[in-house]
Amino acid sequence: MGLHQDRDEGDFSWPVLSVSLGDDALFRVGGVERSDPTESVWLRSGDVVVMGGEARLCHHGIDRVKHGSSMLLPKAGRINLTCRVVA
């Protein structure tokens, strides 16, 4: 999933919480402007990312998934659970 902002909610004061399960994924995060510099970090199964406050509208995405890096799913793969408040 390319760089994007989570803007579906009407109230950005609530954070977005993301739980990674399964294969490792290279997570990239930048700033509020798409042209801002980015940094990347590998997420492993069980890692949690919370984007709140000033980071709530930062651009972010997954650059690649390391197939077969986790034994959580029988045929490899990745599940991402995203939790947000929608009122």
Image (cartoon, helix red, strand yellow):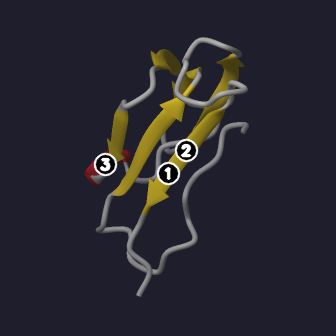
Q: Amino acid at mark 2?
A: Asn
From the viewer's perspective, is 86 left or right of 78?
Answer: left
Q: Which residue is mark 2?
A: 80
In depth, the one of 58 and 23 nearer the eye is 23
Where does the image place residue 73, in percent across and percent down from the top left? 60, 31
Q: Quadrant of residue 50?
A: top left
Q: Is residue 48 visible?
A: yes
Q: How many marks?
A: 3
Q: Is residue 37 visible?
A: no
Q: Which residue is mark 3?
A: 54
Secondary structure under tag 1 reads: strand
Q: Residues within 10 Å of mark 3 (few under 14, many from 20)?
A: few
Where is 39 relative to 9, above or below?
above
Where is 3 relative to 7, above or below?
above
Decide: marks 2, 1 in contact (CB < 8 A)?
yes
Marks 3 and 1: which is nearer the front? 1
Residue at x 47% of width, y 36% of height: 20
Q: Amino acid at mark 3?
A: Glu
The quarter in which the C terminus is drawn is bottom left
The numbered dot on residue 81 is: 1
Q: CA distance from mark 2 to mark 3?
A: 23 Å
Where does the image place residue 32, in percent across and percent down from the top left? 50, 44
Q: CA distance from mark 3 to mark 1?
A: 22 Å
From this viewpoint, which residue is outermost toward the bottom?
87
Secondary structure under tag 3 reads: helix
Secondary structure under tag 2 reads: strand
Q: Quadrant of residue 55?
A: top left
Residue at x 41% of width, y 66% of height: 84
Marks 2 and 3: which is nearer the front? 2
Q: Residues within 10 Å of mark 1 (few under 14, many from 20)?
A: few
The quarter in which the N terminus is drawn is top right
Could you tell which of marks 2 and 3 lies nearer the N-terminus? 3
